[in-house]
Image (cartoon, coloured by chain):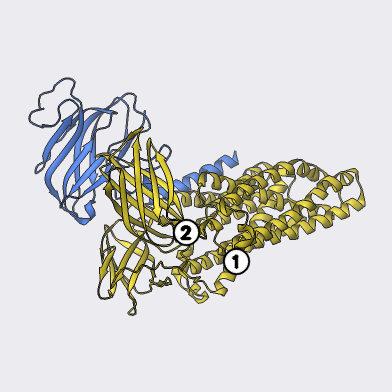
Chain colours: A blue, B yellow
Amino acid sequence: MKTLKTVTGAMLATMAIGLALPASAHITFENKEVAPGATVKFVLRLPHGCSGKTTTGVRIAIPAELTSAKPQPKPGWTLAIMTDDVHKASAETTHAHRAGATIKEISWTGGTLEDAYYDEFVFRATVSKTAANAIFVPVVQECEGGSVDRWIEIPAAGGVSEDLKYPAPSVRVQP
Amino acid sequence: MQYSAKWAVMICIAVFLSVFYSGAAFAHASLIKSDPADSSVSDAAPKSVTLRFSEAVRPLVARLIHPGGHTEVLKDIGEKGDTIVFTLPDTLENGTHILSWRVTSSDGHPIGGGLVFSIGAPSTIAPSVEPQTDLAVRSGLWAARLVLMLGLVFGVGGTAFSILIAGQPVAREEWPVGGLLLAGLLATPLLIGFQGLDALGEPVRALLRWDAWSAGLFATGFGRAVVLGATALVLAYAARQTGRRIGIVLASLSLLNVGLAIASAGHAATASPTLLTRPALFLHAITATLWIGALLPLAILFKQQSFGAMLPLKRFSAAIPLIVGVLILSGLALAVVQLRTVTALWTTDYGQVLLAKLALVAALLLLAAFNRYRLTEPVLAGSKTAVRQLRRSILAEVVLGSLIIAALGLWRFTPPPRTLAAAPVASQEITANKDGLSAILSIHPPVTGAVFVEVRDIVLDGKPLEPLSVSIDLDKPSYGIGPFTRPARKTSAQRYRADGFVLPLDGFWVVRVTVLVSEFRSVTLTDVFDIAKATR
């Protein structure tokens, strides 16, 4: 049907316009899509932030949709994880797996990332089989001088992260 | 379907959708540093204001609002990558100045903000903004808007009537409808230009400059409304050129666009509660367009004295009570929100325009009722005299409809009474809630000038909450002023207060309160304050 063709054409044209826009300057994940039940390497990209100051720490909250989280250590940064049963434990003490302890928070602190540079922070996690739509991972970026940028805003149902000033990075769940 | 029409439709839909996507005007570049700093007080007048952003930006427009209240658009703007320097005039008087700026970030997103600085000491007198637009600009704005509105109501409405209600192919005699579509389309660029002049407070000759056009398109919500209006015109034009089935789709889309255009900007569209006013305005616009728009094709149909006019008349008579019903109900809802009191009808400019409009509408309704209940039946029965009478009466309705549209345009220049509260009250309170969090927001005083915002009784899931932090921003998006952002400090248990706001304009200010519930969770409450003009 011609109408359908016209509308599809318009949609494609719009998408082309949309895709032509440069990628956003927010904190994002390198992966755009994950499958439910899969174990995935998440790469958090830090283009800038901290209002021009040096980034000294990155803390992320692991949402309920992600389990068996395992961060990758980063030279020059102190890695720490916080589980739901132990208040806070360093990476060394939790090296051995303890059943029942779910990681709720990962932090890389004590490093330096100047505003002019770009870096990536990596962790691995298993996506819950029941996950749907999108998974948001709130990130707190600590800055030199004690201030923080909180990339924790999650859009309301039906909204898009683009509208937010400090959107939490997210991945789409694609069954 | 002709190829040209097909392409026109594709482009229009693409423009329409991308305008909606780009509505997200927030993200990306952020202000890192300003000199002088926000809310600073200095002894000597600064020579310039320097803003540094997190990435390269291009300046769009900057307005300096003087302590006396008059607004000046800053011309001398230097840009160098991520830094923008606004050179200030040499003759700054003592008192509080407000700089409202808008820039485009590298990805094309416009962002805006405000900066307050004082020379000598902060002035306590509330600035009141005098009308800045000269008569030529106002007349141009009104005229261009009138032509566009005539194009939308008679052109799109006429097309929608022929295709959707009459269910007939568009007749060759209906060229005035097509002509009005074209006229509306020609008026579109002019309207954008004049809107830019109005937004910047510039004289007509500034139309030669690019910034007037860019401000007309981007600085206020009216730019988007005009683009939507133009899309409606092109869609209606395409609908007239194609076959029946595609015509129905295009005419409906076109009508939808008229509703969206009208509901997307202006006093009524931003009136609280927007959940009521926006749909009401949308329905009001669509029903008015269907009703008034039907008149021109009907008058043309009856010129022929042919029996081809009978079926459309029958269908129109059947549909019109519902259309007028929705029109009146939505209009009533809007009038209640905007007026607040009955006396405002004759004591304010806004009310007088509404009164004039209502008088015209009443005349139109009388004529319509006469046509519907006295003339329609004899006409359908084949009476020649009744046909002549009906045609004359419909032409009179066309004139009345045009007058109503002309009167509507005057509202652009009159603030609604709800913003003109005669005796300013000490504060205005609203309860906002979202995602299980609720709080009472208040603004003191709710008039232009220096104000503070208080947030209290923050409750999360039924339990009182002591948040980690509270931040407040005030924004007047329809005029492209702000947002002004301030952290709130705790004054006592369950009370947070943000000072240092200076509101240069009356009307609606969007308030956003960001409550940091925990390290990794924040909730942003959004609502609207009604700000009255300060009386000196």
Q: Residues within 10 Å of mark 2 (few under 14, many from 20)?
A: some
| Location of residue A10 with respect to B68 vertically, above or below | above
Q: Which tag, 1 or 2, sits closer to the chain's start?
A: 1
Q: Is residue B282 left or right of residue B444?
A: right
Q: Residue furthest left?
A: A92
Give SS at disc 1: helix
- Chain that bears disc 2: B
Write the residue at 48% across / 63% down. Answer: B533
The alpha-carbon separation of the residues under discs 1 and 2 comes to 31 Å
- Dots 1, 2 in contact, CB < 8 A: no
Between B200 and B470, which is closer to the camera in this rendering? Answer: B470
Between B60 and B95, which is closer to the camera in this rendering? Answer: B95
Quadrant in the rendering for residue B356: bottom right
Which residue carries the number 2 mark? B424
Between B58 and A105, which is closer to the camera in this rendering? Answer: A105
Write the residue at 79% across / 59% down. Answer: B396
From this viewpoint, is residue B81 visible? no
